[in-house]
Structure formats: C-alpha cells, structure tokens
Image (cartoon, rainbow, N blue to C red):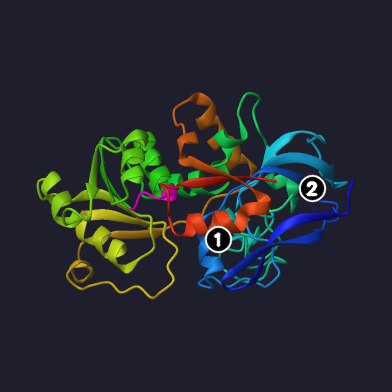
Amino acid sequence: MKKTMKAAVLVEPGRIEIEDKPIPDVGPNDALMRITTTTICGTDVHILKGEYPVAKGLTIGHEPVGVIVKLGAQVTGYEVGQRVIAGAICPSGQSNACLEGLWSQDGPGTRHGLKPAGGWRFGNTIDGTQAEYVLVPDAQANLAVVPDGLTDEQVLMCPDIMSTGFAGAENGNIRIGDTVAVFAQGPIGLCATAGAKLKGATTIITVDAVAERMSMSSHVGADAVINFHSMDPVEEIMRLTNGRGVDVAIEALGTQATFEACLRVLKPGGTLSSLGVYSENLTIPLDAFVAGLGDHKIVTSLCPGGKERMRRLMEVISSGRVDLTPLVTHHYKLDDIVEAYDLFSHQRDGVLKIAITP
C-alpha cells in the first residue's frame, strides 16, 4: 500500500487546501478506512471561517463512508474489505460520560481531556475524513457495517446530519399528535423534520426561504412550509395553531433570530430543542421567556455516535421509511474540494449536500 494520501487540510482560517499526508499507522484498537464517499458539513464551514477553532494542519471532515483496509490487533468481529461507516461522534465507550450514556460528551475522566463535546474527534481533535484514508479510533465501538444493497449516498447522512436531526426530535420528546415547528431547512433541519414525522408529530410547520429547501421540506414530511421573506413566521405559526403555539420548536440554524422565534412560538410547557452551532452569545428576551414562568424546557443536542446509533439509522434507511438521497445535490472529487467548499458555504445552485469522492 502507498505511504501517503491526499487530504483537505486547514492551512489557516479562510484556507482549506489539498495536501499530501502520511497514511496513519494503526494502533491495537484502531481501524484504517479507505474513504469511498464523504461530504462537507455546516460545521466545517464554521471551521473554515475561523468561527470554531481547530489546529492548523488538521484534516477536516467527519462523515465517513468507506472500506476497512487494516484492523488493529484488538479489534474483533470485523473483516478487511467490509463496507462501513463511523459516526461523526466516535466515542471511546469507556469514559465516565459514555458509561452514563452521554456518548457524544466523551470527556471528563478520559485521555481526551475535559473539553465538552469530546466525543467529536474527526476533524476536531484528530484528522478527519476529507481524505483518501481515515484512522478510526476505538474501532470496536464505532465501526458499523453497511447492509448489503445500500449505496454510499443512502448512508452518507447517517454519520452526522441524520443522527443530529433525529436527536433534535428525540430530545424534544415529540409525542404522537404533537405540533412541531422547525426553523431552518438546511440538511440538519430537513433531517429534524423527517425525525419529527417518525416520532409521531401530526402537524409539522417548517421555516425557510430557499425554494429548493422548501420543496425538499415538503418531501421529507412538512405539512406547512413558511417563507420567512413573505410573512412573519411567528405570527403565521400562531395563526396556524389558533394561538395555541407548538409543542416542540426545533432550532436548526444557530442564530439569535431563530432561537428567539422558537421561544415565541412555544405553547406553555413546550420544549425548545436546539441543534444550531452558535458563534455568538445568545440572549433570552424577557417577554419571550415569560419571565421564566412558562414551564418551558430548553434542550441541546450534539450528534449521537457509536456503532449502535449508526446501525439503527441504517435500519431506518433500509426500511424505506426515510429516503435522504435527494439531499445529495452535487458531486465533486476530493481534488476539487476547495471549489466544493465555495459552493457549499455560499449556498449557490440549490446545494444541500455534496458527495465528495477520492
């Protein structure tokens, strides 16, 4: 096997470039995956812009689909040549957080240090997936075999945006018969919409202004789609709910405006489920928060990871209950990833997700 690989590297804020890097050595608990398909996430754009700091020289990306090419001596139950995915969150399975069931917060008490969101390692604390190969740490806890018959693009959403979007619906504790609002219909918001439908919501109201995203929103489960350029979404949601408000409002963009709007459309006792990555401080207006007397709940979610989460998501795909392949709107080679970042970060040409193939 060759000794070097191409990788998309953060040179400095504002610059990601293709460089040659050594193919990683495999430790006893690791696996080496040859990437067949990966993609660009909104969080990668935050990294590119310097809004989320990572080390210069780090390989970016956290959504791998590929083939096992080498296994560590302690990794059992897998074979070289198997098609696999690993979650964007790749926990050790041994930390205090993991043993409490908080896989994504694989932090205090482990070798990974005290940083919150410590389970997110690819493209954050270790080299990521926008490369020809990626080293999967703690492979026993993280490799999930792709079922026969599923394509790369069918499972490409599982490592991050499907897991994250579904978590917004799950942690919002959506019940059968609920009314749910989802603010922003980017890839994660679309997955939150699909997750809300699976959880039993019977009225799903979504908010966006990009025509392609609004159309896709209806495709994945929205009952009403509001164009915020045409009307005030808070007023329209309150009208559609006859002044009652929604049971759950999911924030999927990461801005003050959408966070505040979610608060304003909640019924008394409703839940704000936050998925956004915020790059500035949030403030909570007194009236929207009802001075703290509304019995509201605010919950946050980081993408759940680990092989069992990935297995369950691929079961959803296999069942045909959710089809997220239409979210892949563009295709680029790894060599052209700088161009792909430019397209994705400026949301041109109706882009939702880009399949990147080495």
The relative height of residue 219 versus residue 111 in the rendered view (above or below) is above
Check disc 2 and give the amino acid type. Leu
The residue under the point 81% across, 34% down is 79
Please indicate whether residue 26 sits to the left or right of residue 329 in the image. Answer: right
Near mark 2 (Cα within 10 A), the count class, few <14, some 14-19 or many ≥20, is many
**Residue picked out by circle 1:** 44
Residue 95 visible in this rendered orientation of the protein: yes
Q: Verify CB contact (< 8 Å) between mark 2 and mark 1.
A: no
Check disc 1 and give the amino acid type. Asp
The relative height of residue 46 versus residue 349 in the rendered view (above or below) is below
Q: Nearer the viewer, residue 238 or 127?
A: 127
The residue under the point 25% across, 37% down is 223
The residue under the point 78% across, 40% down is 68
Closer to us: mark 2 or mark 1? 1
The residue under the point 83% across, 44% down is 71
Please indicate whether residue 91 sits to the left or right of residue 313 in the image. Answer: right
Q: Nearer the viewer, residue 243 or 153?
A: 153
Percent coordinates x, y for residue 174 in the rendering: 33, 43
Q: Quadrant location of residue 59?
A: bottom right
Residue 200 visible in this rendered orientation of the protein: no
Looking at the rendered structure, the secondary structure element under dot 1 is helix
Looking at the rendered structure, the secondary structure element under dot 2 is strand
Q: Quadrant location of residue 264?
A: bottom left
**The residue stretch that appears in magenta:** 184-188
Near mark 1 (Cα within 10 A), the count class, few <14, some 14-19 or many ≥20, is many
Q: Which mark is residue 32?
A: 2
Q: How many marks?
A: 2
Q: Nearer the viewer, residue 114 or 329?
A: 329
Q: Earlier in the sequence, mark 2 or mark 1?
A: 2
Q: Which mark is residue 323?
A: none
Answer whether residue 58 is magenta in the image.
Answer: no
